[in-house]
Amino acid sequence: MDTADHAQTVIEQRLADNLEAQRRKSQQSAGRESATECEECGAPIPELRRLASPGCRYCIACQQALETHQKQYNR
């Protein structure tokens, strides 16, 4: 296996791992009711977000900040 094949294999595995993590997260959240207010800042969570992301706890801005923080510190 050459370097390009190995790199492609690593990329495919990371994508598969990320998809599986997202699937598990969706399944865990599906059984919970979405919050109507953000647990971080208290802003109302729009109904469309609550429907699109069952079990959500944060507004979009706080969710993005949380995910950015996790990416920076979970390397």
Image: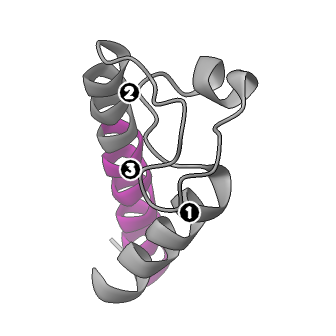
SS majority, magenta: helix
> Element type at marker 1?
helix
Task: Give whichever of discs 2 and 3 has the lower sequence position.
Answer: 3
- Whether residue 48 sits left or right of residue 34 in the image: it is right
**Which residue is found at the position 41% from the left and 26% from the top?**
55
**Which residue is found at the position 65% from the left and 52% from the top?**
60
**Which residue is found at the position 65% from the left and 41% from the top?**
44
Magenta segment range? 2-20
x then y, percent, for residue 61: 66, 62
Q: Which residue is mark 1?
A: 62
Q: Which residue is mark 2?
A: 26
Amino acid identity at mark 2: Ser
Give the class, few, some or many, for how many residues have Cα within 10 Å of label 2's Cα (few <14, many ≥20): some
Q: Which residue is mark 3?
A: 18
Query: Was residue 19 drawn as part of the magenta stretch in this picture?
Result: yes
Which one is in front in this view, the residue at disc 2 or the one at disc 3? Answer: 2
Q: CA distance from mark 1 to mark 3?
A: 21 Å
